[in-house]
Amino acid sequence: MKKTNKEAMINFHLFIKFGEKKYIKKLFEEGELFLNTVDYYTKQENKEIGDSWEDVVWTEPITDFKSRVNNTVITAPSGSLQIHEPNLSQNLYCLWSLDDDIVLDTMNKDDNSVIIDTRDYNDFVNNSEVCYVVITNLEEFIDRVKNELNKRNLKSKFGSVEYFREDKHVGVVHRFMKRNKYKKQNEFQIIVDNKDNSPLKINIGSMKDIAHYFEGNLEFKMTFEVNSEE
């Protein structure tokens, strides 16, 4: 494994989509992807799925904040100020990803292995057993998604999420940024511009040739060959 440019697809080793059985089986067998709206995720009560900052475009930490509104004084000893853009007409599709950076950060140095324990992601579903599709041919998966979106004349962006500390970050929060509290999700996102601002469903066909389907709690162990070449 060589450390490569973050934008290069070779930097990623696999994607995993966690979810309820009825949706994950459809993804695997039919290639059905359901992309919900930004607005949905800002209001989603499941904290593993939702993020009230999904529509935040700018933020700044604050200390000793004080403001007077009519006869009421509002104070905050510490916190953050955010600017939200509530009408972002976009759809999101999120995948757990394993890339070189994560491998190097989490690898067992004794045998150069990384273990993915699916029990860490059981909160991706509500009151049911989590199931998952492990995508191993990443370039083919992305090509199929891009082709389907292009057929519909939908503009899209693909990329990995950058995580930041909300008590330190000052300035723009771009669409591929999330707070550190979500860092374990290692997200790779597909963002689609959709003027209808409604859920979007696309179908890329069976994924049996590029992915694997699993149920129940499992551990995946991957071993890497590492060198110091740049």
Image: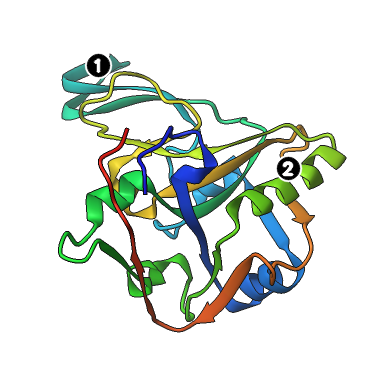
Residue 52 figure quarter = top left
- Which residue is rendered at x = 53% and y = 26% of the image? 85
Q: Give the amino acid type for the residue marked by disc 2 in the picture.
A: Lys
Colour theme: rainbow
Crowding near the residue tagged with mark 2, few <14, some 14–19, many ≥20 C-alpha atoms within 10 Å? some
Q: Which residue is denoted by mark 2 in the rendering? A: 146
Label 2 residue SS? helix
Q: Which badge, 2 or 1, is on the more N-terminal residue?
A: 1
> Which percent across, then down, holds residue 46?
44, 60
- Which residue is rendered at x = 54% and y = 44% of the image? 189
Residue 62 lies, with reference to residue 5, above or below; the image says above
The dot on residue 67 is 1
Q: Is residue 105 left or right of residue 99?
A: left
Crowding near the residue tagged with mark 1, few <14, some 14–19, many ≥20 C-alpha atoms within 10 Å? few
- Which residue is rendered at x = 49% and y = 58% of the image? 14
Q: Is residue 174 left or right of residue 170?
A: right
Residue lying at the far bottom of the rendered structure: 216
> Which percent across, then down, holds residue 142?
66, 48
Measure how far apart labels 2 and 1 are at the Cα level.
Answer: 48 Å
Q: Give the amino acid type for the residue marked by disc 1 in the picture.
A: Ser
Residue lying at the far right of the rendered structure: 151
Label 1 residue SS? strand
Residue 42 appears in the figure: no
Residue 214 lies, with reference to residue 230, above or below; the image says below
- Which residue is rendered at x = 29% and y = 42% of the image? 180
> Which percent across, then down, holds residue 122?
40, 72
Q: Is residue 117 left or right of residue 203?
A: left
Residue 152 figure quarter = top right
Residue 58 lies, with reference to residue 166, above or below; the image says above
Residue 156 appears in the figure: yes
